[in-house]
Amino acid sequence: MRLSSYFMPVLKETPAEAQIVSHRLMLRACLVRQQGAGIYAWLPLGLRVLRKIEQIVREEQNRAGAIEVLMPTIQSAELWRESGRYDAYGPEMLRIKDRHDRDMLFGPTNEEMITTIFRDCVKSYRDLPRNLYHIQWKFRDEVRPRFGVMRGREFLMKDAYSFDLNAEGAHASYNAMFVAYLRTFARLGLVAVPVRAPTGPIGGDLSHEFQILAETGESELFYDAALESISREDLLEATTDSPAVTKLLSLYAMESEQHDAATCTVPKDQLRQKRGIEVGHIFYFGTKYTKAMGCTVSGPDGSQVYPEMGSYGIGVSRLVGAIIEASHDDAGIIWPEAVAPFRVGLINLRADDAKCAAAADDLYEKLNNAGIEVLYDDRDERGGAKFATMDLIGLPWQITVGPKGVEKGVVEMKARSDSVKEEMTVAAALNKLMGI
Ligand code: 5CA
């Protein structure tokens, strides 16, 4: 992509309304534009990141055996009256009337809808277990939308729903999602700490939140310091019986509401109290919805059985902010390779120098031919401004083509993460990128 014909209107000033660094950087780097309280338009750079996160989430759901569907954003109030949650959900639910005066709502979650789909389509235990998921926009009329996409009103969520014949099967489904989550967050460049959590309006008695440690997080956590020794690498290839997973499950980690100082067995000097950003939340709630909504299958002995359910959410749009909170410096964002909007930022230092422009154009073509996603700053701008923009938007690699280098047959390559610069030939730069 040539920057001269792209849409990336970065801001020079720091927006006054943004209280936390990820929100400031998302606005400055022009990833999103606010359209209302907690409602954002995704601009090209932000959309590329959102899609990459979505794809990693999808791949790990598929790997764990979940099957993708797509349910609508608008739901009928009838569904929610069946489960009893229409009144219980309160003012967070955005209620709408259609032209026939029918009560509708913009879905804040999909337990009711998936349960009726299952009820109407699945009749026998032979079709269990199943886990269905979708990646769809949700609306929650939050009292205090804030921190940009972190606590939005409209936000993108991956939500999965498992159906099992019995509690044992449901626990296995829960564990499979637990592991899929650890892998997903590790692939996104994060270490997510699973903590025991209250279940709130979703219901049930078993629940974990996945938290990214960050001072700006809205959750308060208590955990065993030994958790800090588990690395992202340990979790990239996690399975249900990996040592890292066993260790995570055995260590103490609680959301503050669940933490009880009186019964907590972790020695005081081992106990950490920190803040976290909740990027995922999983629940096992058994037959709460299948019973309320009359969803049964015939069991092996012919009797009617209510399937045991769990639900599993990931805040896809919140993750964009959470990743920036975890990975930035004073100059801007530092994207992990897996979610960067482009892998390489190519800078032509002198757009008015014909030799320089020809060399940069040539490298741009080679990168594109090699399938390496590149954003090419071919604008007639000062070098300083180009460097500042590249640092702000945080692409993992910067390659600079300047007149002196062109004379010597080299370019300069910089890693955004550690700012280490290296001069090398174009061939060496291409090899390096293709080897990573
Ligand atoms: N039905 C269940 C699981 S699918 C559910 O809705 N769980 S949840 O309420 O915990 O939401 C799942 C995830 O969505 C959260 O962990 C969080 O990462 C994200 N999320 C929730 N509310 C918001 C919000 N207002 N803005 C951005 N992300 C949110």
Image (tube, rainbow, N blue to C red):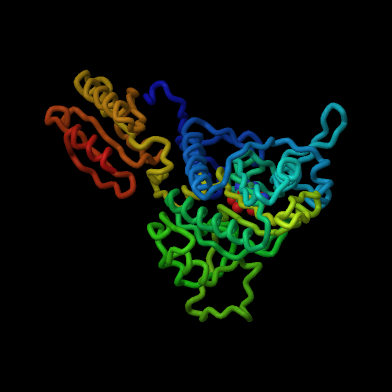
Q: Is residue 389 left or right of residue 79?
A: left
Q: Is residue 250 left or right of residue 3?
A: right
Q: Is residue 357 left or right of residue 326?
A: left
Q: Residue at the spot x=74%, y=51% of the render?
A: 298
Q: Residue at the spot x=58%, y=33% of the render?
A: 41
Q: Is residue 310 left or right of residue 394?
A: right
Residue 192 in sight from this viewpoint: yes
**Relative to 296, residue 266 above or below:** below
Instruction: Give whichever of 212, 398 is nearer the camera.
Output: 212
* Location of residue 296 in the rendering, given as x and y in whole percent from the top left corner: 76, 51
* Location of residue 208 in the rendering, given as x and y in whole percent from the top left corner: 60, 61
* Location of residue 354 in the rendering, given as x and y in whole percent from the top left corner: 22, 18
**Relative to 118, residue 369 above or below:** above
- Say which quadrant the N terminus sits in: top left
Q: Residue furthest right?
A: 101
Q: Residue at the spot x=41%, y=67% of the render?
A: 229
Toward which corner of the image does residue 76 lie, by quadrant? top right
